[in-house]
Image: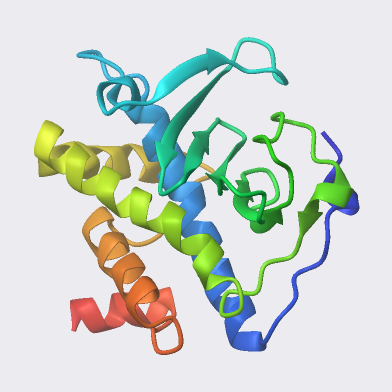
Amino acid sequence: MKFESNLPPVVGSQRSTALLRDLAAAFTQQMFFWGMDASVSSGNLFQKSGFQKSPSLGLKGTSCYSLPWQGGSIFLHGSCVGWLPGAGSPGLMFIRNTGKCFLWQGLEPPIPGKWPKELISSVDLFEDILVLTPFLEWWLEHEAWVSAEMGSAYRTNCYRSYKSLSKSKPWLTPENSVAWLHLLLENPGKVSRAKNFSRQVSA
């Protein structure tokens, strides 16, 4: 699908752009993990945690998941994930094939594979942190729930599987990625780049 040229360019300060690249790397890795969560032999972890599963309106043979969250809803799909507020304000969307976060202006979740350019705008990490926050808070809550449900070794095995892929670009370990996301939410102006955070943890 050649849709990248229709999407807005990255905007904001150099630091915002750099942190958004880190966040995109986190999303890319995490979407692999979420794919594994949906196919656990003992039962789909999203459905176990309250998500509703429905057929995708865009890409045949795929499914979408939705969950009411903080007055809006989380939506998950293999090609995009995000959060929509309930009042018609911009929401967050990450598109896997572009490796970028965007603001989504639609009242309904996007149809996977279709990204109307009039409904998409660029994200500035610092100016739009309140739009990113609900999804990131769900992300962290989901990771805590998965750890309690499956044990810490489960996500470690997900990470090992991701690293084994020939074209993957592993990000921080699951434990360190959770720590980095917490810091991003607590103080986005002071959180370190992921490469430096990794060095600090290993030092």
Image coordinates for residue 129, horizontal then vertical, percent? 52, 71
Compared with 40, 114 (above or below) is below
Residue 170 visible in the current orientation: no
Q: Please indicate whether residue 43 sits to the left or right of residue 103 in the image.
A: left
The quadrant of the picture occupied by the N terminus is top right
Compared with 99, 97 (above or below) is above
Colour convention of the picture? rainbow
Q: Please indicate whether residue 163 sits to the left or right of residue 9 in the image.
A: left
Q: From this viewpoint, which residue is outermost toward the front?
A: 87
Task: Say which residue appears at 68% left-offset and 12% top-offset.
Answer: 60
Task: Say which residue appears at 32% left-offset and 70% top-offset.
Answer: 180
Image coordinates for residue 95, horizontal then vertical, percent? 65, 46
Image coordinates for residue 150, horizontal then vertical, percent? 13, 32
Answer with the quarter of the image where residue 190 lies.
bottom left
| Depth order, front residue of 79/131 | 131
| Depth order, front residue of 9/65 | 65
Task: Say which residue appears at 45% left-offset and 52% top-offset.
Answer: 135
Task: Say which residue appears at 67% left-offset and 67% top-offset.
Answer: 123
| Depth order, front residue of 153/121 | 121
Q: Please indicate whether residue 142 sits to the left or right of residue 76 in the image.
A: left
Image coordinates for residue 200, horizontal then vertical, percent? 25, 83
Answer with the quarter of the image where residue 125 lies.
bottom right
| Depth order, front residue of 80/108 | 108
The quadrant of the picture occupied by the C terminus is bottom left
